[in-house]
Amino acid sequence: TMRMPGVGGTGVVTVSQIIGMAATHAGLHVQGLDQTGLSQKAGAVVSDLRLSTRPLPGSNQLSRAVDLYLGFDQVVALSPGHLSTIAPGRTVAVVSTSPVPTADMVTHPDRTLPTSARVAEVLSELVGPERLFLVDPVRLTERLLGSAVFANVLLLGVAFQAGALPLPSESIERAIELNGVAVPQNLAAFRWGRAWIADRAQVAAVVEREKDHEASPSRAGPALPDAIRQDPELAELVSLRARDLEEYQSPAYAAHYLEVVALAARAEQQAGQRSGAFSAAVARGLHKLMAYKDEYEVARLHLEALPIEAREPGARVSWHLQPPIFKSLGLERKIEVGPWFRYAFVALRAARSLRGTPLDPFGHTQVRRTERRLAAQYEADVRRLVKILTSENHALACELARLPEIVRGYEEVKMRNVAHYEERRRELLDELARSPVSA
């Protein structure tokens, strides 16, 4: 028996179907239930499966302890209702630690993802460290296969190689072939998951080589300031975001981002804080506010995703769009556009230099003006914080730097979250002003 908790949009049901198909191919009886009532993008999805050599009467839903707990999302996997199916000494838990925001976080922006340490603490207590396998499949598949869409199949390979999935490997691979979607990549993901158990050090070495390749001079992006390079974790965090901002707008835009993050890193080092929490929060927060998703960015993202969307022979790509400017004109529903609209995306992508200028045709809506104001305001806050940062107000500064996490969603939802952001920002600035250290 197995339970597979995850979120909509991550392929939970697909992996369940692959396992069921593989079990049938191996001559087993299969009984399952996919609970997809909340399977909107990033909503909770749970698949239960029973495999047996004999017919399985009764309910498809599990009512007893499971042998395999395959968690595709850390938030859903830590839900008490799902954890209740774990039996110490019996259950093997294979759980993703990749950070995947849930739909609930859009409407409740104060809710945050659990740390990897917290996931390990909870699950280790339930199953024991020898039965627990925590993996970051998104990072691995992005490095090894160039896309996170294969993350769950990699997790399936981990579960198989850990001995928690009593099926022949050839049956699982045959099921992947019969599924017919990105077969070579999904087979590779399954085998990389097996390799992660068999020789984790070798997989880590390959990932590092891929990381070094991405950081080669042709793809390295702007040079990192010394204050950032001194912290390897911060350097990796920042380099990825700087390259993204180059693609988002320009090298100058990315260089400006690096300048502000370097100020935060130097101030934190001078304050004697070695955790790097403040500079890491600034790196994430500033990037989030600088890389707001406008029409030019939507065009870029769709163009980059096009090879994946159109990978099947004869596939016809269409998009459903509702730009804010259309909504402001009274268009309440999304419109469908066909393959021809790719040329519009190309034109939008090329016109990104208009972003934020008086000539920007999309830049005059309330949402776009607010997004630009938030980025400038946040930078001003950081420049103020670096002048007063000490060990005494470090925690307050970190909380202020993390505030952009609140700004989620689109249109009305985003504007409500912005109001919450600004209210909390004022409270924190008042606390800092009352602090004798920052007086």
Image (tube, grey):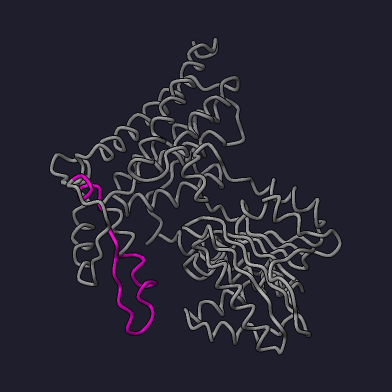
Check if residue 23 falls in the magenta segment.
no
Q: Which residue is located at x 51 percent, y 82 percent? A: 184
Most extreme residue toward the front is 58
Q: Position of residue 107 (x, y in %)?
A: 47, 42
Most extreme residue toward the right is 89
Q: Which residue is located at x 46 percent, y 24 percent? A: 385
Q: Nearer the viewer, residue 111 or 119?
A: 111
Q: Position of residue 218 (x, y in %)?
A: 37, 62
Q: Nearer the viewer, residue 394 or 408?
A: 408
Would residue 63 appear left or right of 295 to someone viewing this image?
A: right
Figure check: 243 above or below 281: below
- Identify the image quadrant of residue 14: bottom right
Would residue 299 appear left or right of 162 to someone viewing this image?
A: left
Figure check: 42 above or below 161: above
Quadrant location of the N terminus?
bottom right
Q: Position of residue 146 (x, y in %)?
A: 47, 68
Q: Position of residue 287 (x, y in %)?
A: 40, 43
Figure check: 60 above or below 113: below
Q: How many numbered marks are there? A: 0
- The residues colored magenta run 303-328
Q: Which residue is located at x 69 percent, y 45 percent? A: 118
Figure check: 226 above or below 326: above
Would residue 283 appear left or right of 152 to someone viewing this image?
A: left
Q: Nearer the viewer, residue 21 or 184?
A: 21
Check if residue 324 falls in the magenta segment.
yes
Most extreme residue toward the left is 359
